[in-house]
Amino acid sequence: MSLKGRDIVSIRDLSREEIDEILAAARRMIPYAEGTRSSGSLSGRIVVLAFFEPSTRTRLSFDAAAQRLGGRSLTIADASESSLRKGESLNDTIRMLAHYGDAIVLRHPNEGAARLAAMVSDRPVLNAGDGAGQHPTQTLVDLATIRESFGTLAGLRIVLLGDLRHGRTVHSLARALAIYGSAIRTVSPPGLSLPPEVAEQVVELGGEIQEEASLAKAVRDADVLYVTRLQKERFLDPAEYAQVAGSYRVDAAALQGARDRLVVMHPLPRTGEIAPELDATPRAAYFRQAFLAVPVRMALLGLVLNGKVP
Ligand code: NCD
């Protein structure tokens, strides 16, 4: 089935074949993302970037992707500058935005907002993060990074570390990894483990998942350590956040027992959970991951708007 006109709300909206197709297209888009090749394939197209929560990488990489392919963007970068603040419903906002552009990229603090938007909009909606729900386009970036590092997505051992309860990137990533038959280990502070429904889906999809108390033990035979920050803004009780703040940090010592091939990933922004001493080591994949956001989002926009990439 073509991806043209499709909504991407959950990573489960995509089959393994479709994910493979997007990743293959993303690889071809790398020179365009670097600016060494150019294309006007999105010329005349407008992508609406509707961001009702803070974002740097996601919004700007979508914007760069659209512009490098000759498209344009309209941006809401701050909920306080839009009419939602005046009490407009999301429903009305989306209906209107669907008349102003050819696709809507939505980030919203409420879980389920992107699904609602997709129901209302007759233009494709791409979920750029819905509260503590999902973040499927980040997952495609993550998968592209893993594939570039190892040449495959199948049969890898991946450790997910951090605030797995509120972190939407890991909610999408765990499901996707399961489709490729990965063995997932989770390590998280007390009370912040992966929601049971996500863990259950991983097993249903053919993945293997196991909670691990010790990071040192979890990384010993791992290929990827995927680190996330505490999602401070999602804690309802500041005292609960204070209890876990600073409770994990990955540095060279923490990775001493790991295999040479282990890479460290992070969707960014980091807030102290990865020591800068790792930045210059071959293990650090997080800045490459941030770059790959551009070719992956070029591939997504090309496939969703045109059914193809240059
Ligand atoms: C993530 C997000 O917004 O969920 N950031 C991103 O899109 N790269 C991760 C985070 O904010 O911790």
Image (cartoon, grey):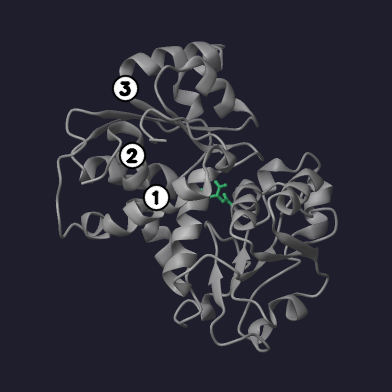
Q: CA distance from mark 2 to mark 1?
A: 9 Å
Quick check: 289 left or right of 164? left
Under mark 3, the amino acid is: Gly
Q: Is residue 79 above or below residue 188?
A: above
Q: Tell me what residue is drawn at x 74 percent, y 59 percent.
A: 245
Q: Which residue is mark 2?
A: 303
Q: Which residue is mark 1?
A: 21
Q: Which residue is mark 3?
A: 101
Q: Is residue 266 above or below residue 170?
A: below
Q: Is residue 219 visible?
A: yes
- Helix, strand or loop under label 2: helix
The residue closer to the viewer here, 292 or 15, is: 15
- Dot 3 beta carbon under 8 Å from ligand 1: no
- Helix, strand or loop under label 3: loop
- Helix, strand or loop under label 1: helix
Q: Tell me what residue is drawn at x 45 percent, y 45 percent.
A: 18
Q: Is residue 56 visible?
A: no
Q: At which x and y percent is residue 140?
A: 48, 51
Circle 2 or circle 1, nearest the eye = 1
The residue closer to the viewer here, 149 or 256, is: 149
